[in-house]
Amino acid sequence: MTDAFAHFSARLAFETDCADVYADQRAGVSFTLVDVRGEDAWRQGRVSGAVHLPHAEIAARAPQEIDRSLPVVVYCWSPGCNGAHRGAREFARLGYDVREMPGGYEYWVREGQPWETDEGPGQRVFDPLVMVVRQRPQTASVTA
């Protein structure tokens, strides 16, 4: 049990989910959210409030662009992508307090959190396969 406890404790120390990141944004918690995907992916859509720093450029750019005094949360496309692992590893190597958001951009959007492109905000859609979706009660209509 000790190995399992240590394993899951470590995961919680170094990972955070989309809902918790969004709750922290709404609560005004200070941190830097970093999208580590490439330029085409960033232009296609990104988490509102994120900054763009592809994982291959972190070593060169982060010390000048990312405030070391704030925690960093990194994300990539989805749970099937390891770009966030690469980005988190590089931030950790540079001495940042870093966590990964494993659901990535995919789960952020599927959970209905705010996302955007250069043109503005995207349409928020809530996917019942990844979260509880509560619908408003239907009102009865009377026809004559």
Image (tube, grey):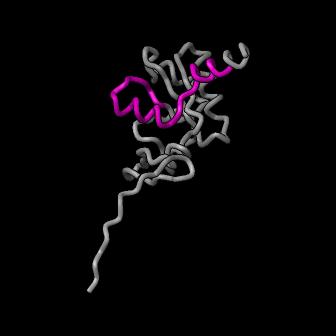
Q: In the picture shown, does residue 27 fall above or below 6?
A: below
Seen at 38% across and 53% down, the residue is 119
- Residue 129 vs 6, above or below: the answer is below
**Magenta span includes 10:** yes
Rendered image quadrant of residue 95: top right
Quadrant into which the C terminus falls: bottom left
Residue 75 placement, left or right of 29: right
Which residue occupies the foreground of this view, 26 or 67?
26
Of 119 and 11, which appears nearest the observer? 11
Q: Is residue 7 above or below residue 42?
A: above
Q: Residue at x 36, y 57 (%)?
A: 136
**Residue 46 visible, this angle:** yes
Q: Nearer the viewer, residue 17 or 121?
A: 17
Q: Position of residue 60 (x, y in %)?
A: 56, 23
> Looking at the picture, does residue 75 appear above or below residue 142?
above
Give the image location of residue 63, x and y in percent.
50, 18
Q: Residue at x 58, y 23 (%)?
A: 12
Left or right placement of residue 69 versus residue 3 in this view: left
Q: Which residues are magenta?
A: 7-33
Q: Residue at x 51, y 49 (%)?
A: 110
Say whether residue 20 is magenta. Answer: yes
The answer to whether residue 16 is left or right of residue 89 is left
Residue 53: give x, y in percent of width and height. Answer: 52, 32
In the image, 97 versus 44, the foreground residue is: 97
